[in-house]
Image (cartoon, rainbow, N blue to C red):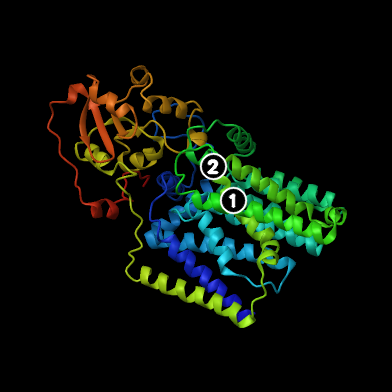
Amino acid sequence: MLVMDLIFYLTLGLFILLFGTLDNNIDFDFWARLVVGKNFFQTGTLFNFDFQSWGTTHKFIDHEWGSSLIFYLVQNYFGDIGIYVFKSIIIFATLFIITKVIRLENKKIPLHFLFFFFSIQAISYNIFSTIRCQTFSFLFFAIYLYILKKTSLKKKYRILWCLPVLNIIWANVHGGFVIGLILILIYTIGEFLNKKPYKPYLITLIAALFTSLINPYGIEYIYFIISALSLNRQYITEWQSLFSTKLYQNIMLKYEIFFISAILIFIASIFKNIKQNGFIKYIKKIDKSKYLTILFALIISIKSIRFHVFFVYSITALCYIDFYNIFNKKLPEKIDKLKEIIFFILILISTISHIINYKFINIVKPSEYPIFCSEFIKINNLKGNIFTNFHTGSYVSYKLYPNNQIYMDGRYEEVYDVNLINQMATVFLAKNYKNFFKKNHTDILIINKIYPIYNELKKDLDWFLAFEDENFALFLPAKLKNKIYKLPNKNLNYYNKTKFETDINWL
């Protein structure tokens, strides 16, 4: 048992390392996180305003400030390889805890890597991108699930007091701590329906609500979180429903297959249990907390692409045994073990062959970032307000401040007026953009060429196309048309080596 567990965890770790290096992108908001971290360690303070923007901002309530500090330390002291290793450790720790949840009900149940392979593949686009703040929410979700499940089974309620303490950390690294509070509420209701003591969970929930106030912003932080939950994010792809967005359908096909398969198998397991025990006995016997957790994860995963991970982790942790009982054909022990060893060898060979020549460098892809346009602005010393997509705003500001400010970046609910992102969307769709630029003084435009406004601006006499690459175009006011401009370096190695260089400094 111990040997096979060791093989399973080695296979899992190698698999995470392999797939964690296949995606070497940098998250769009990572640059803003570095700035917050740098400011804190240089000045000992947190921002209460956004100095990088010329858009309409409000008091800066940063629900990810703790993550910013961690990311800055990792990047500053360990560089790209540190980011990769840190990301892999967090993902492995999360899945390790998921296996511990599984083993709470059956310590001897074999851990088959194939099931985890499909589970991880289903959400690979969500967990293997460059480290993001919500990665901590996935980890804490698994920890909460383990503590709540263990308390329910072992009836040792003292461990619940870990949750209000952990909530302090979670609430200061990511706003997803609300998921943790809801999870405690679910177990409070579930244990009441299970006719088990529910008051310890209720007391824990109340305590966790109070510890949510332990943050740099106090009660204002809670008001902000409540308002953020009600924001209209119709133009943010990751906040759209899996079944409504037209983008990234190919990427999410694996999740769709997993989602449908998991639901069907889950229903099949229910019918199997009803057939074996009878409906009345089954209803009395089932763990209501488990079913409520899965139902909650199911609902939020349908509501938003961002929440897919919670559904996959819930199903994996709470239904692994159900699925195992359906598919377990009781293979001879030697064949069963041989199967896992073969998986280990295949993953080991794949990982070694991939890693041996891998450079562990996070890159800024010209297909995603306006690296050439930003360099054009820098080398030609162009100053003023820049209008660019909120996705790329964080990078542009990181590279060009203090000579330039951006309209907004991806921290839309933390920093900016709630209407800014909708106004930005109408501009990119070429709706009333002239009135927008007149009302909001704009000096430089960096436009992704996929948007309708690109073709409109090429015909607009007030602007001229100063520079473009395959993906982005840079427009300047027509009065600057006759000047001679330097062209940016086209060597991608230059941009990847200098990607973290910035003039933003407080020393």
Instruction: Please name whichever residue, 404 or 83, is drawn nearer the observer in this view of the structure.
Output: 83
Q: Identify residue type, mark 1.
A: Phe
Residue 82: percent from the left, percent from the top?
42, 62
What residue sits 53% from the left and 45% below the top? 64
What residue sits 84% from the left and 57% below the top? 285
73 sits to left or right of 462: right
Q: Quadrant of residue 408?
A: top left
Instruction: Please name whichever residue, 40 or 251, is drawn nearer the observer in this view of the structure.
Output: 251
- Secondary element at tag 2: loop
What residue sits 59% from the left and 80% below the top? 335
Residue 484: percent from the left, percent from the top?
12, 32
- Judging by the rendered image, the residue that carries numbered circle 2 is 242
Residue 1: percent from the left, percent from the top?
64, 79
> Can residue 421 be seen in the rendering of this structure?
yes
- Secondary element at tag 1: helix
Is residue 125 depicted above or below 326 in this figure?
above
Separation (CA) of disc 2 from disc 1:
11 Å
Cβ–Cβ under 8 Å for marks 2 and 1: yes
- Judging by the rendered image, the residue that carries numbered circle 1 is 259
Residue 59: percent from the left, percent from the top?
52, 32
